[in-house]
């Protein structure tokens, strides 16, 4: 903990508020260690139970994490708005940033022409009573999903994939419930689970999706929800294969005590077949976002599922945000209907695949096996993340440490390929090979 920040308070509420203030102002940075319960209690002149309650409240809200023998620390990305100075520092000047996991802006469809067309045909403003899911959007979404084998009877719209997942978890679970999540898995999802006060159970994944034995172990441990990424899994790029889907469906068949959530965030950008699990359990939902193929600013996702689950999400939306903007819905519909946009997305998907496969091949020439069956990231196991990230920084590349995505998985780094050029692959692979297995300095001799 920073020597500049002194914790204070005589009640659990005051102590937790002081810690939260330190996180918000950046004086308690992500990963910062907090004093042991008894040590802080002695410093403040309160009982250890008071400090323990403060820590517990912050853990339940996702601000702190208990790291075993490493004690209690601030989570890497606590769910509280911090001052800009506390945000992730930018890469060194001149470095190539491969850490962000974002699509290449140059490959996104231009929105201007479609926005202009919408403006020219805006019509009267939508009233509160008329707002909701546009029937023509729902019809188009159902057709696209059913073409991929996803049953699309009950349907609603959410403000992106993570918004849909949050509403699903909130509609079915309560703080303290266990959620089975991929390990390594999507950092935003891990943060969301912590912020909701849920308990994550890591499920190991390989190139074909979650391991069946891992899902079975999570169910035995009491998981009440399971979140599976269909394709382009972040960070390792796995895609659920036909064989893995069949085995998982057999394991989950008929379960009435489990919410199954599938996240197909890459959608049209994924150049591998979709093998959905939809309908394997009594409570299920399939979420498909438009942000990856069409642009991160398009905060819209289609959510289908069983009648009760979709009704809960739609009902919660109605008493909160109300609906996803019909202007945004009309824009997405226009993009879906434009053959030129389809061609741009197809070319983007092909480009990402070439960059990803090219880097995997270049790494294999150095004797390194990385993961990246689909999507825009590759996952490279390394002995030590800190030294690997530092070595890459010194070589002029910024990559993401695997700790952001791991629960119990082995160390690794994540590399986003979306902005790479063909000429980048060889030098990047050489830098990664050195970072993954640095040559130790020669020893002193007498």
Image: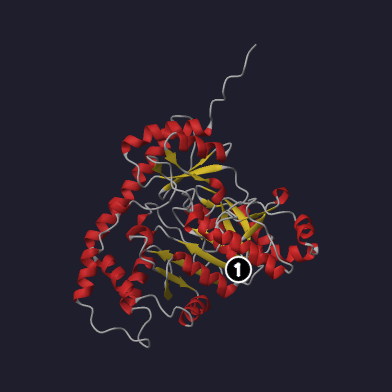
For mark 1, what is the residue?
Answer: 258
Compared with 336, 97 (above or below) is above
Compared with 293, 94 (above or below) is above
Asked whether, in this view, residue 386 is left or right of residue 297, the answer is right
> Helix or strand or loop: what does disc 1 sit on?
loop
Residue at image position (29%, 70%) is: 331
- Quadrant of res 130: bottom left
Residue 153 in sight from this viewpoint: no
Residue at image position (23%, 82%) is: 123
Foreground: 14 or 122? 14
Q: Quadrant of the C terminus?
A: top right
Residue at image position (32%, 35%) is: 423
Residue at image position (39%, 75%) is: 324
Q: Residues within 10 Å of mark 1 (few under 14, many from 20)?
A: many
Compared with 158, 79 (above or below) is above
Pinpoint residue 129: horizontal percent, then vertical percent.
Answer: 37, 88
């Amino acid at each position: 903990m920073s020597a500049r920040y002194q914790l204070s308070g005589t009640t659990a509420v005051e102590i937790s508020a002081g810690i939260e203030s330190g996180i918000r102002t950046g004086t308690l940075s992500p990963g910062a260690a907090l004093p042991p319960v008894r040590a802080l209690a002695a410093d403040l002149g309160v009982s250890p139970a008071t400090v323990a309650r403060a820590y517990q409240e912050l853990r339940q809200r996702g601000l702190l994490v208990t790291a075993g023998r490493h004690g209690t620390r601030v989570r890497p990305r606590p769910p509280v708005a911090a001052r800009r100075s506390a945000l992730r520092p930018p890469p060194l000047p001149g470095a190539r940033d491969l850490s962000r996991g974002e699509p290449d802006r140059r490959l996104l469809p231009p929105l201007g022409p479609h926005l202009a067309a919408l403006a020219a045909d805006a019509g009267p403003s939508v009233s509160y009573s008329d707002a909701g899911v546009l029937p023509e959007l729902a019809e188009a979404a159902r057709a696209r999903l059913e073409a991929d084998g996803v049953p699309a009877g009950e349907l609603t719209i959410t403000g992106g994939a993570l918004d849909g997942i949050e509403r699903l978890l909130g509609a079915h679970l309560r703080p303290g419930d266990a959620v089975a999540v991929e390990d390594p898995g999507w950092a935003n999802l891990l943060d969301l689970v912590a912020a909701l006060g849920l308990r994550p159970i890591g499920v190991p994944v390989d190139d074909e999706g979650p391991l069946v034995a891992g899902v079975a172990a999570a169910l035995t441990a009491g998981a009440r929800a399971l979140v599976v990424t269909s394709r382009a899994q972040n960070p390792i790029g796995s895609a659920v294969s036909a064989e893995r889907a069949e085995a998982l469906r057999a394991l989950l068949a008929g379960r009435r005590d489990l919410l199954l959530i599938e996240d197909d965030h890459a959608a049209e950008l994924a150049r591998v077949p979709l093998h959905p699990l939809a309908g394997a359990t009594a409570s299920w939902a399939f979420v498909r976002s438009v942000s990856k193929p069409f642009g991160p600013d398009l905060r819209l996702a289609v959510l289908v599922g069983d009648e009760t689950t979709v009704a809960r999400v739609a009902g919660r939306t109605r008493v909160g945000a109300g609906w996803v903007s019909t202007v945004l819905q009309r824009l997405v519909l226009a993009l879906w209907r434009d053959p030129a946009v389809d061609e741009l997305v197809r070319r983007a998907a092909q480009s990402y695949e070439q960059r990803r496969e090219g880097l995997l091949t270049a790494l294999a020439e150095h004797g390194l096996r990385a993961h990246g069956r689909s999507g825009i990231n590759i996952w490279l196991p390394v002995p030590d993340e800190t030294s690997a990230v530092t070595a890459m920084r010194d070589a002029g590349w910024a990559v993401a440490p695997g700790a952001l995505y791991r629960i119990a998985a082995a160390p690794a780094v994540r590399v986003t390929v979306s902005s790479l050029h063909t000429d980048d692959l060889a030098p990047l692979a050489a830098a990664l090979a050195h970072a993954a297995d640095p040559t130790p300095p020669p020893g002193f001799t007498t």
